[in-house]
Amino acid sequence: MKLPRLRTILLAPFLLFVMFYLFGVIANLLDDRQVAPLPNASPGSVDEIAIFGASGTAGDGILKAALADPDVSTIRVITRRATPRIEAGVASGKVIMTQHLDYLDYSAVQSQFRDVQAVYWALGTSSRNVDAETYSVIHVDFPVQFLQEWLQVSDRPNISFHYVSSSDISEDSSMHWAREKVRAEKELFALAKGTKLRVIAYRPDYIGPTEEEAHLGQELLYWFFAPVGAAVRAQQIGATMLEVTVRGDEFKNGDKLGTASILHYNDAYRHRH
């Protein structure tokens, strides 16, 4: 019996990968699920929002979507630094930017949130950039502290907090960042339980930057993952957040939206506009 040639041995994993990838592409193309259109959305149904992390990849896309939405009248951006998009929003009169450094103390900016209907939270960093303790402070302590203070000062009858989380996370993961993302979700959901606040978690796979901000490597990654339904553009997350905010009681505290749901609600948002 002849032994398999080295070429065959090397090609086998590649062919299996290609078959698996093509299966994912076909399955994604055949997914015809749609979100039922919103029959009675009125202009101004999302009026005043706040964005944290607008200088980052996800936050920049969320800001782009909010700036393009004619129903959003005021966008309060809380940030450490300005970006060209934030500055353009300020110049348009739609963005009110507040520079803030201490995300464990919001007393200096509490007045900014009394009339905010929804907060879109994209503040974060890669676990490669910081140690484990700092990662926990940024991804758990920062949003938890904000929610505690927001609930004390909000004058709106119903408010919502939209938290950019991540896919492939679990409490028993070997990765510290994955366990902490779950812990953040659970603590935020628990804080909102029994209050006027709803917390919605967004669990995308790969987040592609806005087209104008993406470099070649990011674009290649996006176009590799998108055909199998494992990537979203950052502005699609923003459009989905706006759609979820408008739909109000359709979502309950603790709901989680994965990549497929984000894409479906993004489509619903586009059709509504």
Image (cartoon, rainbow, N blue to C red):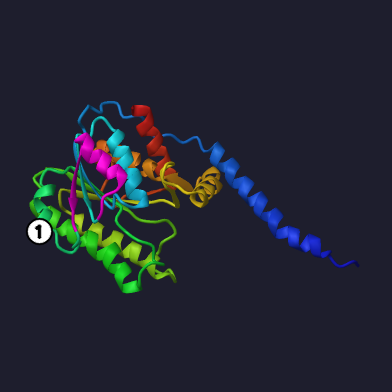
x and y percentages locating residue 260 in the rendered image:
44, 44
Above-or-below relation of 209 to 101: above
User: Magenta span covers which residues?
Assistant: 81-100
x and y percentages locating residue 70 in the rendered image:
26, 30
Above-or-below relation of 258 to 101: above
Q: Does the stretch in magenta take in 252? A: no
Q: Which residue shows up at 73% across the image and 58% down it?
A: 12
Q: Which residue shows up at 79% across the image and 60% down it?
A: 8
Residue 130 visible in the shown view: yes
Query: Which residue is denoted by mark 1 in the rendering?
Result: 107
Front residue of 19 and 253: 19
Q: What residue type is labelled 1?
A: Ser
Task: Say whether residue 170 is left or right of residue 199.
Answer: right
Q: Which residue shows up at 34% across the image and 39% down it?
A: 239
Which quarter of the picture shows residue 27? top right
x and y percentages locating residue 267 in the rendered image:
41, 34
Above-or-below relation of 26 to 205: above
Front residue of 69 and 265: 69
Task: Say whether residue 27 is left or right of residue 82.
Answer: right
Task: Identify the image quadrant of the C terminus.
Answer: top left
Residue 256 visible in the shown view: no
Task: Identify the image quadrant of the N terminus.
Answer: bottom right
Which quarter of the picture shows residue 186? bottom left
x and y percentages locating residue 202 in the rendered image:
35, 50
